[in-house]
Amino acid sequence: MKQSLLTGWNFRRVVYLVVGSAILIDSIWRQQWLGVVFGGYFAAMGIFAFGCASGNCFNKSCCTDYSNKNESNLGDPKK
């Protein structure tokens, strides 16, 4: 956990942290509690590197590789 907080920082994580913190602070100041949840979520994405802040949305790390399947079995559900 400590390692994920201290390493792997990129521009996207910093932007999520800064924008989320700004929304969070402004929402607390204006007492808009839905904005606190919204800003807290984005700030947490930046701090803990989950979701798109970690880069998993764009580097295809969550895509499934279908190249090992036999193409003749794809159309027939019985096989």
Image (cartoon, rainbow, N blue to C red):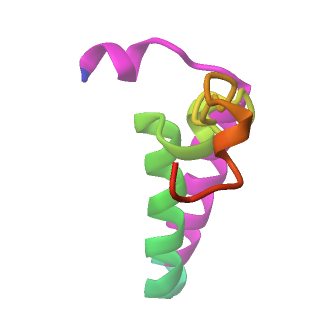
Image x and y of residue 73, in percent: 64, 43
The quarter of the rendered structure image containing the N terminus is: top left
| Residue closer to the observer: 58 or 30 | 58
Q: Residue furthest left?
A: 1
Residue sitting at x 62%, y 30%: 69
* Magenta region includes residue 20: yes
User: Is 1 on the left or on the right of 77, as rendered?
Assistant: left
Image x and y of residue 8, in percent: 53, 15
User: Is 38 on the left or on the right of 68, as rendered?
Assistant: left
Compared to residue 56, the image places residue 76 above or below, namely below
Residue sitting at x 37%, y 20%: 4
Residue sitting at x 58%, y 71%: 26
The magenta span reads 2-27
Image x and y of residue 44, in percent: 43, 48
What secondary structure prevails in the magenta region? Answer: helix
| Residue closer to the observer: 67 or 10 | 67
Count every numbered label the image shows and give the total.
Answer: 0
User: Is 78 on the left or on the right of 55, as rendered?
Assistant: left
* Magenta region includes residue 74: no
Compared to residue 33, the image places residue 1 above or below, namely above
Compared to residue 34, the image places residue 50 above or below, namely above
Residue sitting at x 46%, y 74%: 36
Image x and y of residue 30, in percent: 54, 85
